[in-house]
Amino acid sequence: MNMTESITFTVQPGGYLQGQMRVPGDKSISHRSIMLGSIAEGVTHITGFLEGEDALATLRAFQAMGVQIEGPDKGVVTIHGVGLGGLQAPKEPIYLGNSGTSMRLLSGLLAGQKFDSVLTGDKSLSSRPMRRVLNPLSCMGAKIEATAEGTAPLHIQGQGLLQGAHYDMPIASAQVKSCLLLAGLYASGETSVAEPAPTRDHTERMLAGFSYPVRQKANLVTITGQGRLAATDIDVPGDISSAAFFLVGASIAKNSDLTLQHVGINPTRTGIIDILKLMGANIELLNQRLVGGEPVADIRVQSADLQGIVIPEELVPLAIDEFPVIFIAAACAQGKTILTGAEELRVKESDRIQVMADGLQVLGVDAQPTDDGMVVQGGEISGGEVISHGDHRIAMAFAIAGLKATGHVVIRDCANVNTSFPGFVAMTQRLGLDIVSEG
Ligand code: S3P
């Protein structure tokens, strides 16, 4: 997005968060609903779809491959699935903006098509590592060319049919796992992926929801290629990664009492709740239910005095997108918080270890970056001006820091908040944050 640098948030210090709200739909599920709905047979109806730039990039990609998709209109999308073999060659390179999930999952899905394709992205996406998917895909017979650095643009030579393979993932990545499972749909025989630690399992759950058999045993997931997906209806729950900003905001700001409605609480995503509870947060899960195969709850959060902790490493993949705002919680806690085992944060939309440490230091916080994490000494947050480096979650994390700052916080480079959380500013204003967006 070329407007990235022109949006600035200014947050006045203080305030608290009160009321009830529903955060936008889950980004991971929204991407997958378009992908699976497009290659299913029949008509898939989606409600609660996230109308953010990332999920829209996936939607446009499938439209460009000939899939008739209506919407989104207030979260409602209708997809006229074309079946596993029904996608058509896109006329132009497919531009995926800032979206790593779109690029990594699509590279698997497109490798087994009968046509060639090219995937491109913005500056951030074009610098993110793609060999993590290209290497295992090449073992399945995929032919994909990247730059010498292993980055986009990706030139994919469609192979028609791949060969099923087994892959032991060296890193815990749901994007790599999902990429290979999607490639496995277009492969002969079995494709199996073993993960070193549990990662989000939306692809597995949703394939099953589209009546595609998936076998799971311990850390191994296996599918057999060339079956068929049957269209289904999908109700996308609120994104716990978006709710995370409010879980932290209401915890750190005195007199807060907030209920976040209809949030997905899939156990592969709830590391943020576990970490905040270990820090002493007051969080309750109400009205727990299953919606379309995904657990959902209303989450009530009230202010609490947070304590610094050593974050258990096994929680890292389960909270991988939430560390920017967890660092803000750590800055407001009493004592030291130590994160290790999170080197993946260095290759997200920005280097989230360095960018967060830089911003926290500007705000007077003792935050020491390490190769694979950070040591944050809780204390006072002062006002100041920070740069989000076009990273949506960094921008929103520093906006939340304003609740506890002693002066106003200016955050530059915020346009990409629209990739995952359209309406963030209006929603936070309504709940009690004094924030304005300019540019
Ligand atoms: C995602 C997986 C995670 C996460 C990303 C979305 C997904 O990435 O950070 O925002 O939808 O599969 P990794 O699998 O690379 O950790």
Image (spheres, helix red, strand yellow):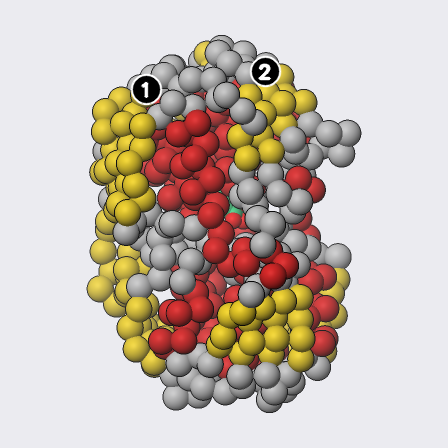
Quadrant for residue 151, please give it: top right
Q: Crowding near pointer 2: few (<14 within 10 Å), some, many (20+)? A: some
Task: Please state the horizontal and vertical placement of residue 347, each as a whole percent of the image.
Answer: 66, 48
Q: Which mark is residue 83?
A: 1
Q: How many marks?
A: 2
Q: Earlier in the sequence, mark 1 or mark 2?
A: 1
Q: Is residue 85 above or below residue 12?
A: above
User: Which residue type does callout 2 highlight?
Assistant: Gln
Task: Please state the horizontal and vertical placement of residue 354, each as a whole percent of the image.
Answer: 72, 61
Task: Please state the horizontal and vertical placement of residue 120, each as a whole percent of the image.
Answer: 60, 33
Quadrant for residue 66, please give it: top left
Residue 234 lies left or right of residue 122; in this view the side is left
Q: Secondary structure at mark 2?
A: strand
Mark 2 residue's CB less than 8 Å from ligand 1: no
Is residue 81 at all visible to an observer of this figure? yes
- Decide which of 221, 373 is in the foreground and name it: 373
User: Which residue type does callout 1 highlight?
Assistant: Gly
Q: Secondary structure at mark 1?
A: loop
Q: Crowding near pointer 1: few (<14 within 10 Å), some, many (20+)? A: some
Is residue 401 at all visible to an observer of this figure? no
What is the spatial separation of the Cα atoms under label 1 and label 2, in whole angstroms?
20 Å
Task: Please state the horizontal and vertical placement of residue 306, each as a whole percent of the image.
Answer: 51, 81
Residue at horizontal 36 percent and vertical 57 percent from the top: 24
- Decide which of 167, 84 is in the foreground and name it: 84
Q: Is residue 131 above or below residue 361?
A: above
Q: Is residue 50 above or below residue 356?
A: above
Residue at horizontal 63 percent and vertical 59 percent from the top: 5
Residue at horizontal 66 percent and vertical 39 percent from the top: 126
| Residue placed under numbered mark 2 in the picture | 157
Residue 204 lies left or right of residue 410; in this view the side is left
Which corner quadrant holds the C terminus? bottom right
Residue 302 lies left or right of residue 382; in this view the side is left
